Amino acid sequence: MTIRLFNTMSRKIEEFKPLVPGKMGFYSCGPTVYHYAHIGNLRTMIHNDILKRMFLANGYKVHHVMNITDVGHLSSDDADSGDDKMEKGAARDKKSVWEIAKFYTDEFLRDYDDLNIIRPTDMPRATDYIAEQIDLVKKLEELGYTYEIAGDGIYYDTSKFAAYGQLTGGSLTGNRAGARVEYNSDKRNPTDFALWKFSPKNEKRQMEWNSPWGIGFPGWHAECSAMSMKLLGNHFDIHTGGEDLSRIHHTNEIAQSEPITGAPWVNYWVHFSFLIDKSGEKMSKSKGEFLGLDSVRKRGYDPMVYRYLILLGHYQTQLAFSWEAMDSAANGYKNLVRRLADVLANTVPGEFSESDFVTWKDKILAPVSDNMKTAESLVQIQNLLRDDTISASTKIALFEFVDDLLGLQFIDRAKKINNLESMTVPDDIQKLADARAAAKASKDWGRADEIRAQIENAGWSIMDTPNGVKIIKKV
């Protein structure tokens, strides 16, 4: 099936053409592990997962690299000044930098697994690739792209790279990329960026290394270029990240990579839009309080509901998060699971239809292959459940494909519902259900709703169906 993606570099949707037939290599910018990931970060990770699953469903062998940033990400907009986020996080938690790097990496991966995201092929840590980052800077120095700011570090001279800012339509004149970066009078150009930072005098950092230029640590941008080239080669298919990374971080990656590799370094740039709050503000750790996946868990939501919410939107459109939106997504997800559970309970062996399977598989895969239109695939899934001409066995096989493609674990949750339905309802819950039925019969709707809430709070769900009331244990 033809795959089409919006390429930030060309600013248009393009047909995907792999560097190597049948293979796709991609690099996604990963977390800076100084704190928990917020749900906006995790939206990006879910979109990366859909991209990967879509290629796998189309028969590609996928090599996915995602970095773990555990050094060098400074707190300023351009990541060239301010506190190192890792050192700052260590001071906050009263632990060593190495301890918080491990702790928050483990927490990030717990979220990753709970959201059913396929782990990357390679997950390199910046601190394991210091030699490669030093080598990158040395090559750029030999090519004449660097200069030193005394007491500060080794900087990249963006005036030497004619295509600087091309990713976002900028240039070194006029509307250039990085225009909001604060001006440092020691820089030759406002857009210049640090490749290697010197450790502060009279202060020993927890993470610092010897280099040809003195003791210090790599600039944040260097790690992605060095590690992607090491693990994917000098040219690879796709680079992804949040939309905020395109203007500075990815622009700088291109500038420091293409003098070494030759253009183009990456064929397709795919960027994911922000998750925003009710006020329209981007969700960010820098705002102080933020929502992590634990907030979702503690409110009783299945992490699959959050994944489902994300897939109801499109990766190029900002998505507003609210608990009301989560409630709506929970209802939609549970409704699909409930209907699938009914299909599972009525599956008749030997009724599988190959032709129906192929037809519906293409209907479901086509929207995701066309610039990752997951919401359209979810509509097709609902249509599939409504189609009484499709056998139960065929529908189950198609949902196995859907779970591989969208990672929503429909079959797992549907099986749990069927098992839970067979559980004996406790006497106190049954009495509440009977009281609710009496309240409804007398049209005391307020009392009926109160009793439903009591049942829900006790960990059970009550549903009115054409065949009567069902009481099941919550998944």
Image: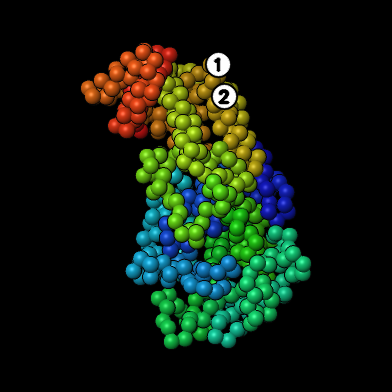
Residue 11 lies left or right of residue 154; in this view the side is right
**Quadrant that contains the C terminus:** top left
Q: Percent position (x, y) of residue 304?
A: 44, 39
Q: Which residue in the rendered view is the most extreme toward the left?
A: 427
Instruction: Name the residue nearer the viewer: 288 or 39.
Output: 288
Mark closer to the observer (1, 2): 2
Q: Can residue 137 be seen in this view?
A: yes
Local packing at callout 2 (Cα closer than 10 Å; few below 14, some 14-19, many 20+) is few
- The residue singled out by tag 2 in the image is 383
Q: Which of marks 1 and 2 is nearer the N terminus?
A: 2
Cα separation, mark 1 vs mark 2, equals 11 Å
Q: Percent position (x, y) of residue 257?
A: 64, 68
Q: Residue at x 52, y 53 (%)?
A: 283
Residue 469 lies left or right of residue 265; in this view the side is left
Q: Which residue in the rendered view is the most extreme toward the right?
A: 174
Local packing at callout 1 (Cα closer than 10 Å; few below 14, some 14-19, many 20+) is few
- The residue singled out by tag 1 in the image is 389
Relative height, residue 114 to residue 74 (above, below): above
Under circle 2, the secondary element is helix
Under circle 1, the secondary element is loop
Give, as a three-letter code, the residue at label 2.
Answer: Asn
Relative height, residue 114 to residue 248 (above, below): above
Q: Which residue is drawn at 48% across and 50% down?
A: 39
Residue 475 lies left or right of residue 156; in this view the side is left
